[in-house]
Image (cartoon, rainbow, N blue to C red):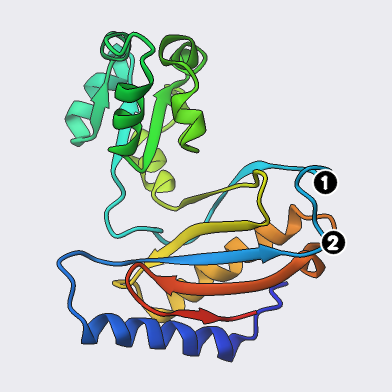
């Protein structure tokens, strides 16, 4: 169960949404959670790289690209989903700069399951370093549903720092929708820690260009 006080969370979200209305941007701001840990040593305690699916989208417009085999390429064309083939990846020749540029263009990558293991062999560890390991999709899954799920997926990857930031929604969502995302995400994240909420020093929430608010 979340240790974040409901009223504190709601007020912070209302402040963020009000602030975004006062200062109009030429883009829809993303809202993120910022966790700081305590009594947790990433060099000794378990690190992790886990995902959780929240109820609502975590960005206004997630840029998704699929690394597709022939069958998935046809499906992507029908659904209007951006895709590339393995032949395209081979043109990078494992050079870091074009791989990084490719990785930075998109928020999420999907991959035909039969290609997933071939990707790092073809382009190296570039996508992994960007925390954008492609999500494998088999042909028994409905691609449109997997794309929707990808738009609601948050990745928690603990590296060598006690700080971790994740997108949690956007300012075009309703307050209650953001609250639900926060609660699901924070409960999942704390479940990965040794002592759950006892390992959390602080939690802040903020929009891309707005003020940050402490909620725990």
Residues at circles 1 and 2 in contact by the CB criterion of under 8 Å: no
Numbered disc total: 2
Where 163 falls versus 204 (above or below)? above
For residue 24, above or below residue 198: below
Mark 1 or 2: in front is: 1
Q: Quadrant of the C terminus?
A: bottom right
Q: Is residue 138 left or right of residue 72?
A: right
The percent position of residue 201, horizontal first and vertical second, equals 72, 71
Q: Is residue 177 visible?
A: yes
Q: What residue is shown with label 2? A: 195
Q: Is residue 134 visible?
A: no
Provide the residue designation for mark 1: 45
Going 35% across and 67% down the picture, which residue do you hit?
A: 208
Alpha carbons under labels 1 and 2: distance apart: 11 Å
Dot 2, crowdedness within 10 Å: few (<14), some or many (≥20)? few
Secondary structure beneath disc 2? loop
Residue drawn at x 73%, y 68% is 200
Task: Name the spot of residue 49 as percent of width and height, x first.
Answer: 63, 40
Q: Quadrant of the rendered structure where residue 157 is?
A: top right
x then y, percent, for residue 144? 33, 39
Residue 20 shown left or right of residue 161 in the figure: left
């Amino acid at each position: 169960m979340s240790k974040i006080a409901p009223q504190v969370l709601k007020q912070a979200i209302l402040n963020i949404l009000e602030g975004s209305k006062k200062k109009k941007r030429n883009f829809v701001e993303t809202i993120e959670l910022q966790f700081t840990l305590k009594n947790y040593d990433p060099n000794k305690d378990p690190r992790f790289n886990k995902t959780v699916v929240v109820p609502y989208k975590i960005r206004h417009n997630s840029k998704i690209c699929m690394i597709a085999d022939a069958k998935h390429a046809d499906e992507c064309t029908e659904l209007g989903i951006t895709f590339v083939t393995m032949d395209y990846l081979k043109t990078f020749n494992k050079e870091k700069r074009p791989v990084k540029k490719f990785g930075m263009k998109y928020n999420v990558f999907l991959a035909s399951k039969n290609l997933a293991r071939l990707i790092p062999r073809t382009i190296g560890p570039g996508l992994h370093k960007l925390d954008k390991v492609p999500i494998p999709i088999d042909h028994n899954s409905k691609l449109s549903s997997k794309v929707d799920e990808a738009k609601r997926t948050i990745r928690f990857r603990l590296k060598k720092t006690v700080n971790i930031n994740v997108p949690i929604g956007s300012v075009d969502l309703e307050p209650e929708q953001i609250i639900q995302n926060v609660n699901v995400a924070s409960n999942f994240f704390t479940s990965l820690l040794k002592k759950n909420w006892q390992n959390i020093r602080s939690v802040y929430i903020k929009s891309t260009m707005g003020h940050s608010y402490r909620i725990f």
